[in-house]
Amino acid sequence: MVYLKAIEAHGFKSFADKVNIKFDAGVTAVVGPNGSGKSNITDAIRWVLGEQSARSIRGVKMEDVIFNGTSGRKPMNFAFVKLVLDNRAKTLQIEADEVHITRKLYRSGDSEYYINDEKSRLKEINELFLDSGLGRNAYNIISQGEVDEVLKAKPEQRRGLIEEAAGVMKYKLRKKESEKRLED
Ligand code: ATP
Ligand code: MG
């Protein structure tokens, strides 16, 4: 199984200084006072995996992820997050034992994604994580309220959850894409 080895963040929300948060195999608990940035860590993971909704990561507009300054510190003009994943099990369809996923956003609105330091598109990131149980829509991050949502889900939504877990999403997506090509 692929696992998260480290997160680097710089200019993302409260992480004005570059931080490198390392995770060992096994269980990690993050503790700290209210407002110290614990939830910003999971926001960073969602964001780097391609989150497109500012609201899902507790913002109003996407620019809100960029460090916006404190009394003693100027705002920054970019946000950067890199995930370091252990891929020795080759869960992700890439030859490398270690996979780096990077997202960078500038105040100008320019946004960049990288897979192993090579410039990529969001679509490639989505495809890489499809059915790996790790993508931004997968259930590796359970936020408050999501448990309720699963319980209240309509049958077809619940079916979607089961399909993602069973690993058939990529085939459904490819089928949809080829059907669309036939229509065009
Ligand atoms: P709790 O225990 O209450 O859940 P937490 O440790 O999860 O707290 P977070 O919600 O991760 O805390 O962090 C919130 C902090 O991040 C706030 O102090 C907020 O000001 C800061 N923050 C969020 N966005 C930015 C930003 N763009 N620039 C600077 N600071 C930010
Ligand atoms: Mg929190």
Image: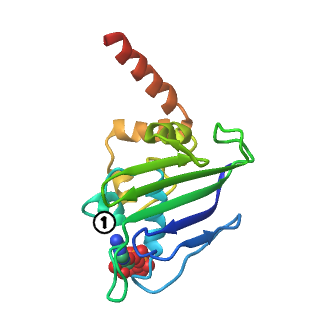
Q: In the image, what residue occupies the spot 44% across and 20% down?
A: 175
Please name whichever residue, 166 or 83, is drawn nearer the observer in this view of the structure.
83
- Say if 64 sits above or below 120 in the image: below
Q: In the image, what residue occupies the spot 35% across and 80% down?
A: 74
The quadrant in which residue 146 appears is: bottom left
Please name whichever residue, 181 or 77, is drawn nearer the observer in this view of the structure.
77
Q: Residue under circle 1?
A: 64
Residue 132 location (% of width, % of height): 58, 42
Q: Which residue type does callout 1 highlight?
A: Asp
Question: Which quadrant of the rendered structure holds the C terminus?
Answer: top left
- Say if 38 sits above or below 141 in the image: below
SS at circle 1: helix
Residue occupying the far left of the picture: 60
Q: Is residue 54 left or right of residue 10?
A: left
Q: In the image, what residue occupies the spot 35% across and 35% down?
A: 156
The quadrant in which residue 143 appears is: bottom left
Residue 137 location (% of width, % of height): 44, 47
Residue 138 location (% of width, % of height): 48, 48
Q: In the image, what residue occupies the spot 39% across and 51% down?
A: 111
Residue occupying the far bottom of the picture: 72
Please name whichever residue, 9 or 37, is drawn nearer the observer in this view of the structure.
9
- Say if 181 sits above or below 149 in the image: above
Is the C-beta of the residue carrying label 1 under 8 Å from the nearest atom of ligand 1? yes
